[in-house]
Amino acid sequence: MRVKICGITSYEDAMLAVDAGADALGFVFYPASPRYISPEATRRIVDRLPPFVEKVGLFVEESAEEIEAKAHESGITLAQIHFDVDEAFLDGIDFPTLPVVRARAPEDLERFADRYRLVDAWCEAYGGSGKRLALEWFAGRDNSRIVIAGGLTPENVGELAGYGFYGCDVSSGTEASKGVKDPEKVRAFIEHAQSLR
């Protein structure tokens, strides 16, 4: 299973995740988040990273033009659209996107069914809440285009086995404190998640 380590705020944490085998790194461009990092600071990290690592920027309540501008400024390779939008909004962004479904009920899993998407537990705040989704919602369906997020830790990521998710996304479950990664948690999470491939 592919792994995204989100909430990266330093080059050291970025390389910790890359060296442990992360497929993608997440940078939060939402100023209200304790994991916020500016596009300029992200660029300073991204420019020093090795090749073949996906760099994902998380956007909340921004226009297509703002998303495109910050994406190019920061050097990310994928824009995670972490607020309620429609297909037309996504199509209007001239940059690769990953929509987020903040699921309240099983039927929400059908949103953006023709796209790769990230599915997170619904909550008032955006991202990093630690709330978990009910895995039974995903039983018996095609999850091959879903990146699952929400409340994942090194201790529980093994529960994703058998559901066929494209990948998983973790933030708070690998932290020592908000915005600071715990090396042992990062390494353990990636090892356990990748064993599910």
Image (tube, grey):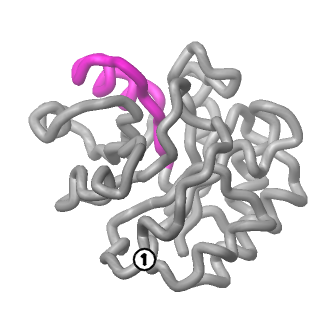
Q: For residue 29: magenta?
A: no
Instruction: Write the residue at 36% across / 19% down.
Output: 61
Picture coordinates of residue 187 (x, y %)? 81, 64
How many tags in the picture?
1
Q: What crowding class fits label 1: few (fewer than 14 Cα within 10 Å), some (14-19), or many (20 or more)?
A: few
Q: Which residues are magenta?
A: 55-74
Picture coordinates of residue 28 (x, y %)? 56, 30
Instruction: Write the residue at 42% across / 77% down.
Output: 139
In the displayed structure, would residue 81 be above or below residue 6? above
Horizontal side, residue 195 vs residue 85: left or right:
right
Q: Quadrant of the N terminus?
A: bottom right
Quarter of the image for residue 90 reads top left
Quarter of the image for residue 36 reads top right
Whether residue 167 can be seen here: yes
Picture coordinates of residue 124 (x, y %)? 51, 25
In the displayed structure, would residue 122 be above or below residue 149? above
Q: Which residue is mark 1?
A: 139
Horizontal side, residue 63 vs residue 50: left or right:
left
The one nearer the camera, 50 or 133, is: 133
Horizontal side, residue 171 vs residue 176: left or right:
left
- Amino acid type, residue under disc 1 in the picture: Ala
Q: Secondary structure at mark 1?
A: loop
Instruction: Write the residue at 49% across / 70% down.
Output: 136
Picture coordinates of residue 21 (x, y %)? 68, 68
